[in-house]
Amino acid sequence: MSAEHEGTSTPPLRFPAGLYGVTPEWDDTDRLLDAVRQAAAGGMTALQLRRKDATAAQRAGQARALAPLCRELGVVFLVNDHWRLALEVGADGAHLGRDDGDLAQARAQAGPGLILGASCYDDLARARHLLDSGADYIAFGAVFSSSIKPQAVRAPLALLGQARELAEGHGAPRPAVVAIGGITPANAGQVVQAGADSIAVITGLFQAPDIRQAARACAAPFTVHSHYKP
């Protein structure tokens, strides 16, 4: 992280700093809800429903179950790919990838109240365009080798600091910088130190033997590094 970030508090963000859980491909909704409760107890601040292999009915059913639970737990809830479904179930937002439609169009149709985040991979030019289109966060990765997407493009940690400087030019509250890909309790601190406002974690969180403890360990760097202290 560049020196100017050290010793300063984080300005208000459009998306919460901290641990951003991303759901695994589980069909068992009861198991998923229990895991989310454990992750929230460990400090997870946001959750994304990511069901690439589910049917539309399965995805919608889990979204409808998760939205009220996340509201109860105080966890910001987003739906991957499907911003219309996010609106339908009362989610807080949606995450859009390269093939999920135009973010500016989604913003125009969904209105200002829906949080919209987007994948930037390793592309700062794409991030700049998405910020201009109204993104509330820009996500980079994979920052480490990912078992979920082993062929994913790699985004060096140094890119996170550059992305944060880019985001800081887009008003207050400013858009957040999210890192994803191969993040675990063991390496989360490196990612936060590099400039990530939020770390998106799938396997390192939901496949852990103790989900609550894994969440606590992933969230810990946000209280350790000076730029995230109140």
Image (spheres, grey):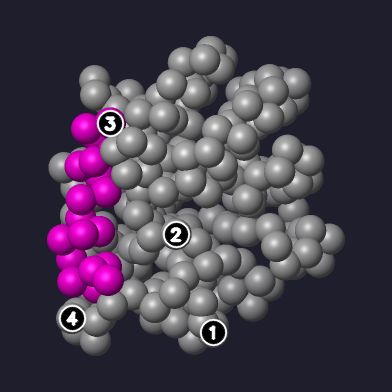
Query: Of helix, strand and loop, which one carries label 3?
Result: helix
Cα separation, mark 1 vs mark 2, equals 16 Å
Dot placed on the residue nearer the N-terminal end, 2 or 3 = 2
Q: What amino acid type should be assigned to the residue bearing mark 3? A: Arg
Location of residue 80 in the rendering, given as x and y in whole percent from the top left corner = 61, 42
Q: Residue 226 colored magenta?
A: yes
Q: Are marks 1 and 4 in contact (CB under 8 Å)?
A: no
Looking at the image, tell me whether mark 3 or mark 1 is earlier in sequence order: 1
Q: Find the magenta span and give its range.
A: 212-230
- Horizontal side of 32 relative to 181 (left or right) equals right
- Which of the numbered marks, if any, corresponds to residue 16? 2
Q: Residues within 10 Å of mark 2 (few under 14, many from 20)?
A: some
**Dominant secondary structure, magenta:** helix
Is tag 1's residue or tag 2's residue first in the polypeptide sequence? 2
Residue extending farthest to the front is 72
Q: Position of residue 192 (x, y in %)?
A: 26, 60
